[in-house]
């Protein structure tokens, strides 16, 4: 630091002035709390977490040091509304202030968390979380019900997994909002609707990830009661693996994600067929071994002193055993063929349903195209009509709209031309 020429005002270096500002800010703003929306989250290799907290009028930089990142109960994500506690400081290199965050939680999470814990205690006291009331999923379900948004990522992920793992399945969607006011009632109604419909082997209820507020409809008592009264086993697939909802606790099975729910509800068709193949081979080996043992026993009996004379009886029983073994082999092969035929039939029915849906939607699209073409105001030009406009752009609808000497531009189906009015005649003026 050095004085100015007239020795009246001190002149600071940038570093000195910044340090004075830092001291003033840090001395006055310790242990502050700020609420806003997270944006521009960065997680470099250092392990620290950098982001911005903003509202409609301003923004402030935020940093969480690596030692504090490990203690967080949540991970900041772009668009998430949070409440942060920490110390205000100045980053001298950039001359900017920032908040060093020590604790972070979703805004409004405190009251929601309290409501969550209260309902959890209530339902747990009723025994609705007990493992004894949970039902196993069917070994090979053929009809799957899904309660979720028809436009969300969850339904796409579930259908992708189901189609890839076992394309012969029949899927029924009960569309419902999965966020916001009224969503819980729609989810509960979807579960009841699938139960009333009948023919469903298992139900998947869920949505993709989000904040506590986004997932809150799955923490409402209406959804929990609908899951409990369902006669069909329910899989809860809400949010990410770290998200837990009341729906998870009352469901027969909890899946960490919607994709995982699809993987849990069905096994791979190839694995199922491989299991059948292994079982068939094991049965064949067991039958062959039993057959060989029986042959050896009868051969030994036929060679014994007792059966040496009546050898014909031993041969008769030997032939009977051969015949029974052959019949068993034919029955096993026929059973395997019938199982394979049923699997192929299921695949053909699914393919037919998919083709029918594609054909229906294609026909609907062609109908819409025809409607668009019919309502296109320019389509009439192809039938020999034209549109005339004055120099100011207004459409000429009657001869009285122009006067001699005006310039008129005429639009045709292909191209346009400009002409000058030489004569007008309006029949209404006759």
Image: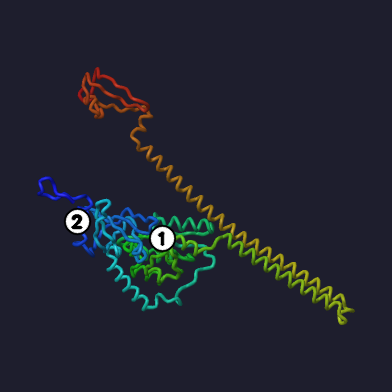
Residue topped by disc 1: 174
Secondary structure at numbered mark 2: helix
Near mark 2 (Cα within 10 A), the count class, few <14, some 14-19 or many ≥20, is few
Quick one: quadrant of the C terminus? top left
Residue topped by disc 2: 20
Q: In the image, is 398 to the left or to the right of 173?
A: left
Please provide percent x and percent y for residue 307. Answer: 86, 79
Q: Nearer the viewer, residue 72 or 242?
A: 72
Q: Earlier in the sequence, mark 1 or mark 2?
A: 2
Q: Quarter of the image holding residue 48?
A: bottom left
Q: Nearer the viewer, residue 125 or 367?
A: 125
Is any part of residue 419 visible from this angle?
A: yes
Q: In the image, is 276 to the left or to the right of 372?
A: right
Q: Nearer the viewer, residue 85 or 359?
A: 85
Q: Nearer the viewer, mark 1 or mark 2?
A: 2
Near mark 1 (Cα within 10 A), the count class, few <14, some 14-19 or many ≥20, is many
The residue positioned 29% from the left and 71% from the top of the image is 114
Q: In this picture, is 359 found above or below 180?
A: above
Q: Nearer the viewer, residue 365 or 31?
A: 31
Please provide percent x and percent y for residue 365. Answer: 42, 44
Is any part of residue 185 visible from this angle?
A: no
Secondary structure at numbered mark 1: strand
């Amino acid at each position: 630091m050095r004085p100015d020429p007239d020795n009246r005002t001190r002149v600071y270096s940038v570093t000195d002035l910044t340090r004075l500002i830092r001291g003033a800010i840090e001395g006055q703003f310790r242990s502050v709390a700020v609420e806003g929306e997270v944006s521009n989250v960065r997680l470099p290799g250092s392990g620290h977490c950098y982001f911005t907290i903003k509202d409609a009028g301003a923004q402030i930089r935020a940093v969480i040091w690596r030692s504090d990142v490990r203690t967080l109960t949540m991970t900041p994500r772009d668009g998430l509304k949070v409440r942060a506690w920490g110390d205000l400081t100045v980053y001298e290199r950039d001359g900017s202030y920032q908040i060093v965050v020590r604790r972070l939680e979703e805004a409004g999470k405190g009251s929601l968390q309290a409501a969550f814990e209260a309902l959890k205690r209530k339902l747990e006291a009723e025994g609705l979380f007990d493992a004894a009331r949970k039902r196993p999923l069917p070994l090979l379900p053929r009809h799957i019900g899904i309660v979720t948004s028809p436009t969300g990522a969850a339904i796409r992920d579930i259908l992708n997994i189901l189609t890839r793992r076992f394309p012969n399945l029949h899927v029924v969607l009960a569309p419902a909002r999965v966020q916001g006011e009224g969503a819980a009632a729609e989810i509960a109604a979807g579960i009841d609707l699938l139960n009333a419909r009948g023919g469903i082997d298992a139900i998947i209820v869920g949505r993709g990830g989000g904040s506590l507020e986004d997932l809150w409809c799955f923490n409402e008592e209406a959804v929990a009661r609908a899951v409990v009264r369902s006669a069909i086993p329910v899989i809860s697939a809400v949010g990410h693996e770290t998200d837990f909802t009341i729906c998870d606790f009352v469901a027969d099975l909890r899946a960490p994600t919607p994709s995982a729910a699809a993987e849990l509800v069905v096994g791979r068709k190839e694995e199922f067929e491989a299991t059948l193949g292994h079982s068939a081979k094991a049965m064949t080996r067991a039958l062959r071994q039993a057959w060989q043992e029986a042959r050896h026993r009868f051969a030994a009996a036929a060679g014994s002193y007792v059966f040496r004379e009546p050898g014909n009886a031993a041969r008769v029983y030997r032939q009977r055993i051969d015949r029974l073994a052959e019949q068993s082999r034919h029955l096993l092969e026929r059973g395997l063929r019938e199982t394979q035929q049923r699997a192929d039939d299921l695949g053909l029915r699914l393919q037919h349903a998919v083709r029918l849906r594609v054909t229906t939607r294609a026909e609907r699209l062609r109908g819409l195209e025809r409607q668009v073409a019919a309502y296109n105001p320019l389509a009439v030009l192809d039938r020999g009509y034209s549109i005339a406009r004055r120099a100011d752009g207004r459409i000429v609808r009657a001869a009285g709209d122009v006067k001699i000497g005006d310039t008129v531009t005429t639009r045709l189906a292909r191209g346009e031309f400009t002409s000058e009015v030489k004569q007008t005649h309006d029949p209404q003026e006759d």
